[in-house]
Image (spheres, rainbow, N blue to C red):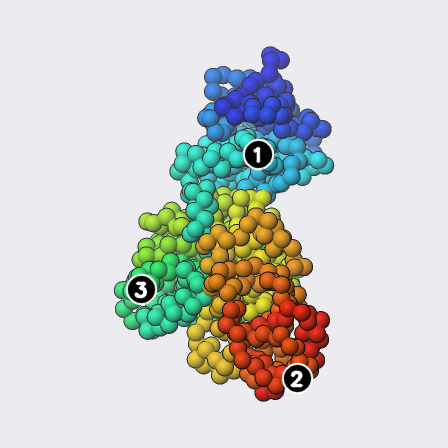
Amino acid sequence: MSTQNLVFENARFSLVVGADAIVKELRLKSTGEDCLDHTEETALFSLTEDRPYNNEIKLAHPNKRTTFEANRLRREGDQLIVGFEQILFEAIVEVAVTDEYLTFTLVDFLVPHEAFDGLAMSPPPVAKFRLLQLPIRNRTHFGEWLNVMWDDEAAVNVLGTDPFTNIDSEKRKGFRILTADALREFRLKGCSASLIVAPTNELLDCIDTFEKDYDLPRGVESRRNTKDINSSICWTDEISPKNVDDHIRFAKRAGFKKMLIFYAAFCKSIEGYDYCGDYEFNESYPNGMQDLKAVVDALRAAGITPGLHVLHTHIGKRTSYVTPVADHRLHLTRHFTLTKPLAETNTEIYVAQNPQGVVMHPQCRVLKFGGELIEYTAYTTTPPYRFTGCRRGHWNTLVTPHDAGTIGGILDISEFSATSVYLDQDTDLQDEIAEKIAAIYDLGFEFMYYDGSEGTNAPFEIYIPYAQYRVYQKLKHTPLFCEGAAKAHFSWHMLSGGNAFDICLTRYLKENLIRHQQPEAARMANDFTRINFGWWGLFEDSQSHLFEYGTSKAAAWGAPTTLRLQLSQFYEKPQFRLNPRIADILEVFRRWEAVREQQFLTEEQKIALRDPELEYTLLIDENGQYELVRYYPISAPENVIAYTFDRSERTYVVYWHLHGEGQLELSSAIDDLRCEKSLGSPLTVTNLRIPVGDKHYVSTQHHKDELIAAFQSAKVIV
């Protein structure tokens, strides 16, 4: 066997692999640096069998899932012939070289007769083929989603060319092994992975070319469109032809130029996601598609970009896919075989398999046999195995007899409210749902939120992006960007807006921002992606300083927010309608959206804003210009919020009442006190009393300590 190294190189890097299949060098040409860690000897390829199948290997070694490392390599043109330890067959891997990347594709196997002599099977019995594995030395950043190791100088990236390549990494001490696998249940022959090594400032250029070459969603192009991708969003589930103008007015008051419309705004829905999947229009849209198009057109005419929020993997419990006959394309998490006929009156179900460990949440104990759903209450774990306390015809499905030998199983019910189930990604139901979604999206929507993306079969790292891709491919118009509730490697090309954090109560907003959004923003920056710091609810106790904290942190990371708008709260709940601080809240959003669009913040300001301990407010100064200042909370009278800051040689206190209006009586006079509703427009105040309600500013040039002390001991007079 030849001992000569094999060299693969393009304009940016070279990969050297020994004839023993061990990777020797991965060198970036611009710096001359070898990006590999050499602590361990790592074979470029390997393959895995569920157990050894060759008879002698089976007899000699334990019968378990076994990985065989590549141990010999020879080159024939653009193809590599790969041999492995112990086993007798070889693999053919094609290597394609471009200036931006190398691609490795499993072409075929070379199986000599003696490898599986006498076995009635389709050889080789490969469960997984490792297309690529490289021990990459740790650098400053690792993007676990894109699967990229990088710092200011260099980036190493392993990508899948389609949703079926399993891209991952294995953490070691001081390095990571970047991996790409072809899986038997999806595709072995023809499965590909690509390697990019480039100066970091050229990485996205290389990925952009890669996406175009493989006709993938243009994740790089979308991310570079920062004007469209980074502005904040107004979310609604109530918009209709009758109130679209109200929504537009609200959005404009807050400076929003995007509106995300939840499908339940225009589709039938009673409880949770119970009608998700049918996409039948509700009573607010009597003319169906025509009415929805009119709403979308009205938003676009007003300069607001419409987005569509759907749950593409969810099938509601009241839909035609579930009742009266449950569709055969609904996913089952476990399968059971009837050992006795099941008559229409039977309440015990005898099965061949042990039900040990099946779901027992009271909303999710549902079996499916044929088109009937059956609720169970208990089960046995000793023979004869059976489900007991069964209630037939669950969710109004038709009760029918089922023969012995019928195979059914546990219905995959969504863990979110249990009003929907997950469809089976191994069927065409996802494509059927995708066509319905695409018909709606193509009315003029321009971005999309893939909610419920986690609701697929395992392996999730394959099916989550594949389900998203099946919808994406049906769209006639490419989205400006997409966001989602879950992601895996291939999703990077579609979810250029990353993920959005879900709604929480006002009292937990700041805590959650520190615990979740801020760390995730940093992680996602490693993947060259922004997150969405929302969604945020507008509640009766909402206050502007919390939204200012959130919007400032989002702006620091170049990330948008999403404010959930439900106009009915203003109309139907007096206590919310009378909350007088809504104007201040909307002004916070408007200001931060304006400075985002103007690219007002410097890099130094962004870095300072990221500190979770620091709070900043965005002012409009006496000349109408934006001004960023750090401010500090101070104690205040009951139901009053107050912060202090210094600017223009004066000390200020900005303050407001949580829910009331009146006057604030200071404990002592300050001779140069100035009170302003907006900076540059002083109000006349007398008798030590200043107005309290919406935001106001009081300031002094010479009496900082006196002002704060007088304010802290003031009394509210309503």
The Cα–Cα distance between marks 1 and 2, rounded to whole angstroms, is 60 Å
**Disc 1 packing (10 Å; few <14; some 14–19; many ≥20):** many
Vertical comparison of 165 with 17: above or below: below
Q: Is residue 84 visible?
A: no
Secondary-structure class at tag 2: strand
Residue 292 percent across, percent down from the top left = 32, 64
Where disc 3 sits, the SS reads helix
Instruction: Say which quadrant the C terminus sits in.
Output: bottom right
Q: Which residue is mark 3?
A: 298
Residue 296 sits above or below residue 424 on the image? below
Given residues 62 and 152, the one toward you in this image is 152
For the residue labelled by badge 1, is the local secondary structure a helix, a strand or a loop? Answer: strand
Packing grade of label 2 (10 A; few <14, some 14-19, many >=20) is some
Residue 146 or 603: which is nearer the viewer? 603
Amino acid, disc 3: Ala
Residue type indicated by callout 2: Lys
In the rendering, at what x and y percent does residue 186 appear?
49, 40
Image quadrant containing the N terminus: top right
Question: Dot 1 corresponds to which residue?
Answer: 155
Q: Earlier in the sequence, mark 3 or mark 1?
A: 1
**Mark closer to the observer (3, 2):** 2
Which residue was labeled with disc 2?
Answer: 715
Q: CA distance from mark 3 to mark 1?
A: 45 Å
Q: Which amino acid does the dot numbered 1 rest on? A: Ala
User: At 32% from the left edge and 49% from the top edge, which residue is drawn?
Assistant: 476
Identify the residue at horizontal 62%, vertical 28% (top origin). 35
Q: Residues within 10 Å of mark 3 (few under 14, many from 20)?
A: some
Q: Where is residue 509? Give x, y as percent.
A: 60, 66
